[in-house]
Each structure stands twice: as structure tokens, then as C-alpha cells.
Image (cartoon, rainbow, N blue to C red):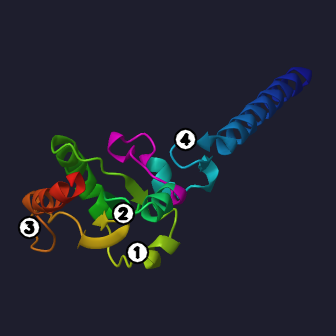
Amino acid sequence: MKKKKKVKMIYVYIAIIVVLFGFIFVLNNNGKVNALYNKPVSELNPATRALLDDPNYQNIILPDELDKMVADKEDFFVYLFASDCPHCRYTTPQLMPLADELGIDLPQFNLREFPTYFAKYNVEYTPTLAYFKDGVQVDKLEGGLAEEGTTAGYSLDDFREFFNKHAGAEAQ
């Protein structure tokens, strides 16, 4: 009987140690500030957390940066997306290489993390590719790439034309 009790106590001690290590791990990871969003990972939307290591979502800008570009009356493109948007997840992996190919800096703004910007920039659908001239939004493509078997959405050539239409304006 004593032997069974000792074995049982060993299991209890092991369980306590596992729980403590798990608790320490959770505390350490939840308090980490993410470099892209400048806030603790635990405060990010779960869909955003899933994209943190995705190479297609690394050119993130924050509200202060976007607001400064507007206030400084800059000419720029911005890709407004929502981390939980299936159309964004389909479009982004094709759009970012296109922007790179054309030599366009395309900052990405996650509306799921900063939802007040939906209204601020009159965004009804994600993704939205917007162009700002002198800090004012002058044009946008609202919606993503047309997925196979559908007619709703844009082609990659539509995005290319949008970039080319405004890229010359940026250089002026």
C-alpha cells in the first residue's frame, strides 16, 4: 500500500511541475510585445496572430504612421486588409509580389486591429488598395482578386493597371 501511495505522490508532483511550467510559458508569451503591431501578442486578434510569421504580411504600418503620411500630404499606396478576411488571404500572396515586381512600397494596414479606420477611410470591403495624393485618398480598388470559378473581384492585371496609373503620379 505504501508503494502505491509513493507512486501516486510522484505523479502528483510531476503534474504540479508541468502545470507550473505551462503557466510560466503562457505568462512569458502573452506579455511579449509584437514588433509589427507594437502591442502584446495576447491583445492581437487570433487571426492576426496566425499571420505574424507570414512573409506576405510583414510591411505593416500602424495608425500613427498612416496618420503622419496623410498629415504630411504624401503620395502613397496603402493596402487595407482584415486579418480574418478570406478574400485578403487569397489576394495578399499574389498582390505583394506584384508590388515588389513593380518597385512599389505597399504598406499594409490591418483594419481588424484598428477598426475605427473602416469608417475613417470609408472602407466597405476588404481588401482595399488605396492611393493617396497629397495626403488625400483619390482612388481605390475595393475588393480582392477574383477567385477561380467566380466573376466577383479583380484580376491581377487590374491591380497592375492601378499601380501603373498612380506610380507615375508618385514620381512627379
Which amino acid does the dot numbered 4 rest on? Ala
Is mark 1 in CB contact (under 8 Å) with mark 3?
Answer: no
Where's the C terminus, which quadrant? bottom left
> Callout 2 environment at 10 Å: few (<14), some (14 to 19), or many (20+)?
many
Q: Earlier in the sequence, mark 1 or mark 2?
A: 2
Q: Position of residue 37 (x, y in %)?
A: 54, 49
Which amino acid does the dot numbered 3 rest on? Gly
Which amino acid does the dot numbered 2 rest on? Leu
Q: Identify residue for label 1.
A: 121
Query: Could you tell me how far apart the alpha carbons at marks 4 and 1 are, in whole angstroms?
Result: 25 Å
Q: Earlier in the sequence, mark 4 or mark 1?
A: 4
Q: Which mark is residue 35?
A: 4
Check disc 3 and report its element: helix, strand or loop: loop
Q: Nearer the viewer, mark 2 or mark 3?
A: 2
Q: Which residues are magenta?
A: 51-64
Check disc 1 and report its element: helix, strand or loop: loop
